[in-house]
Image (spheres, rainbow, N blue to C red):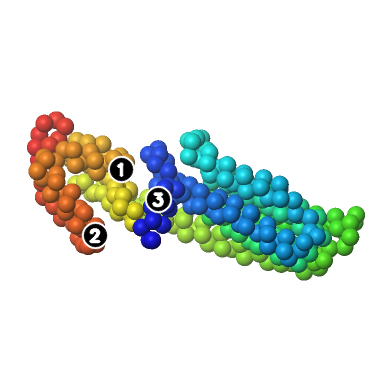
């Protein structure tokens, strides 16, 4: 079962070598979030129908929002343009989803069911936007957008429609609390990411200053292996490109066949046992020299 889940999760990861490892991870996670969002939008339809049979909740609107999320998910497999901007596309879909549900809550006079749903949508989508953001501005814009839509919906009920079921001060106070907490958490998340990037930059600088070929190897749960980083001196020593993408394949292609099979076996064994890896082998440089 775990193997099946890992295979399905791996299928969500793009294979584009021109995308960074972070970008591929973000696309992978946002593909999962888009499918989950579509499922929740449609899955809650019968629950709202049972809880509030007379409520205004057109099914075509739910299918439209779910279709937008599924359409983005499908387009990300066919278009590199969409993949390269997939996080921004999902964030745009978050605005559409929030606007749709705020409208539904307004039409239903912010009844308990729809008011609770709107607050839940606000919390979840703010977290999604924060997870994919690289600056606070995107998160603040989204939080302000959701708050102002809600305030406008409550004001509309007071001015032109029947009074809202929810207390406007209490509900707006709840929205404000969510916005403050989401803002604090997102700021902490962004600072952690910034520190990771700083540490990675220092690591790369140190590794590139050392003699020899320094690399960072990875082995994922889905069985894929490769390199996240290869130092610049590698090209001088081995004569092959230090580009991490495809480095393992280029390196193995220069190892004599008999040693290559033994080297591949030793790598698999080290990964499976999570043990230290050490291997000595001849290596044929592209110039024809053997080292």
Q: Check disc 2 and report the residue beneath it.
A: 272
Measured as percent of width and height from the top left, residue 117 is found at 69, 62
Badge 1 marks a residue whose secondary structure is loop
C-alpha distance separating marks 1 and 3: 20 Å
**Which one is earlier in the sequence, the residue at label 3 or at label 2?**
3
Badge nearest the viewer, 1 or 3: 3
Measured as percent of width and height from the top left, residue 46 is found at 68, 59
The quarter in which the N terminus is drawn is: bottom left
Residue 149 seen by the camera: no
- Relative depth, front residue between 265 and 254: 265
Relative placement, left or right, of 207 versus 164 is left
The quarter in which the C terminus is drawn is: top left
Q: On the image, which quarter does residue 196 sit in?
A: bottom left
Near mark 3 (Cα within 10 A), the count class, few <14, some 14-19 or many ≥20, is: some
Q: On the image, which quarter does residue 115 sit in?
A: bottom right
Q: Check disc 1 and report the residue beneath it.
A: 244
User: Do the residues under discs 3 and 2 have CB atoms within 8 angstroms?
Assistant: no
**Which one is earlier in the sequence, the residue at label 2 or at label 1?**
1
Q: Check disc 3 and report the residue beneath it.
A: 10
C-alpha distance separating marks 2 and 1: 22 Å
Q: Which residue is pictured at 65% across the width and 62% down the height?
A: 120
Q: Which residue is pictured at 65% across the width and 59% down the height?
A: 44
Disc marking residue 280: none
Measured as percent of width and height from the top left, residue 141 is found at 66, 51
């Amino acid at each position: 079962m775990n193997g099946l889940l890992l295979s399905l999760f791996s299928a969500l990861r793009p294979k584009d070598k021109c995308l960074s490892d972070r970008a591929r991870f973000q696309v992978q996670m946002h593909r999962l979030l888009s499918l989950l969002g579509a499922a929740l939008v449609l899955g809650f339809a019968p629950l709202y129908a049972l809880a509030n049979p007379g409520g205004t909740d057109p099914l075509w609107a739910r299918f439209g929002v779910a279709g937008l999320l599924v359409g983005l998910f499908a387009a990300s497999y066919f278009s590199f343009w969409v993949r390269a901007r997939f996080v921004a596309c999902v964030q745009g879909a978050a605005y559409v989803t929030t606007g749709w549900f705020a409208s539904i809550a307004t039409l239903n006079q912010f009844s308990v069911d729809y008011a609770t749903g709107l607050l839940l949508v606000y919390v979840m989508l703010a977290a999604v936007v924060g997870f994919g953001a690289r600056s606070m501005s995107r998160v603040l814009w989204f939080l302000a957008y959701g708050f102002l839509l809600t305030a406008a919906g409550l004001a509309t009920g007071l001015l032109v429609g029947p009074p809202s079921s929810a207390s406007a001060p209490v509900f707006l106070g709840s929205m404000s609390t969510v916005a403050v907490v989401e803002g604090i958490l997102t700021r902490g998340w962004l600072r952690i990411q910034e520190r990771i990037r700083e540490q990675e930059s220092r690591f790369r600088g140190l590794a590139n200053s050392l003699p020899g070929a320094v690399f960072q190897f990875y082995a994922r749960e889905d069985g894929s292996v490769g390199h996240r980083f290869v130092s610049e001196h590698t090209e001088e020593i081995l004569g092959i490109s230090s580009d991490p993408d495809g480095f393992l394949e280029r390196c193995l292609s220069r190892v004599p066949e008999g040693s290559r099979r033994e080297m591949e076996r030793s790598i698999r064994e080290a990964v499976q046992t999570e043990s230290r890896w050490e291997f000595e082998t001849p290596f044929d440089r592209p110039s024809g020299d053997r080292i």
